[in-house]
Amino acid sequence: MTPLTEQQITSLARLREPFPASEIRYLPRVWCGNCRDLKGACKSHQRVKCQKCRNNISSAHIDLSYVGHAEATNRLLNVDPSWGWEPVALDEKGLPQHDQNGGLWIRLTVCGVTRLGYGNADGKRGGDAVKEIIGDAIRNAGMRFGMALDLWTSSDLEIAEHGPKDAPTDPDPTPPPVAATPPRPAPAAVADPPQEQRPGAMPPAGAAEREAALAEMKSAAATVGFLDGLPAQFADSFGHPIEKGTAAEFRQATALMRGSVAA
C-alpha cells in the first residue's frame, strides 16, 4: 500500500471534524416488540411527542444520531471537490448491481484514497429507494474515513454494520413469588396488589415515568456495550431484579453508567 502524503493526511483529517448540531438528525428505533407490532404504543408504554426526533412515537424507543445525504455530500465537496463513487459491480445492462438483499456495494474515493461502503433501503422499492440506497452507501463508506464517526456508539456501529437488532422487550409482567418474611408482632391487613401487577390492569400514573427511566437505563447500557450484563449487575447493586426496580433506581444506574455519579 502506497503511504499517504502529508497533503492527503491533512485533507482526510477534515472529514473527521464534528458536524455542527444544526446538521445532526435523529432516527428513532422502537425497542419494545409489542409497540413495533402495534405500530404505536402497547399497554405498558405511551405515545409521546419526542423532543429529539420530533416524532409522535412510543416512549419505548431510542434515537440514533446521523447526518443526512446532503450534509455528507457537502462535507465531501469541502474536503475534495473531485471526490466520486462507483458501484463495485455492474449488471448485464451496465447499471449498478444490487445484491440479493437489495443493497449496493460501492467504492468511495476521496483525495485519491478508495474505501468500500454498503447501502440499503430496508426493502423499499422505486426511484426514491434507489436514491436512499446510494445516499446510505456514501455515508457508510464515508464512515470508513471517519466521517460522522463520533455520532456512533459501539451498539450503533453494530446496527450500522448488520442492521437493527431487537432490543430486550418488556420483562414478564407477572411478579415473581414474594419471599416469606418473619412474622410481625401485629399482623397487618393484606393490601391489594399494586395496580401494575393485576392482570389486564392499566398502568398507574407513575408507570410512564418508570418505563421512561427504564428505557433510558437500557439505552445507556447499550451505549457502553453492557446490555447483556445489565440484569445481573442491577440485581447485585440493588438487591432485587430489574422487574422490581423503581424509576429512581433506574436513573441512578443510568447515571453510574454515564459516569456522572461516583461508583
Image: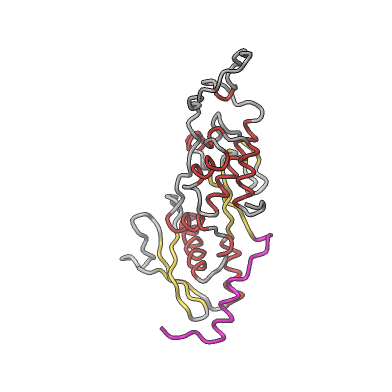
Residue 250 position, x and y percent, is: 61, 41
Residue 139 position, x and y percent, is: 52, 64
Q: Tell me the residue at 58%/60% (across/down).
A: 151
Q: Nearer the viewer, residue 13 or 141?
A: 13
Q: Tell me the residue at 49%/43% (across/down).
A: 232
Q: Tell me the residue at 41%/62% (across/down).
A: 104
> Image quadrant of residue 209?
top right
Which residues lie in the magenta part?
1-23
- Residue 205 magenta-highlighted: no
Labels in figure, total = 0
Which quadrant of the figure contains the N terminus?
bottom left
Residue 93 position, x and y percent, is: 33, 65
Q: Does residue 65 sit above or below 208 in this rendering?
A: below
Majority secondary structure in the magenta region: helix
Q: Does residue 212 sit above or below 7 in this rendering?
A: above
Q: Nearer the viewer, residue 148 or 130?
A: 148
In the displayed image of the protein, which residue is found farthest to the front? 185
> Image quadrant of residue 87?
bottom left
Left or right: residue 138 versus residue 68 is left
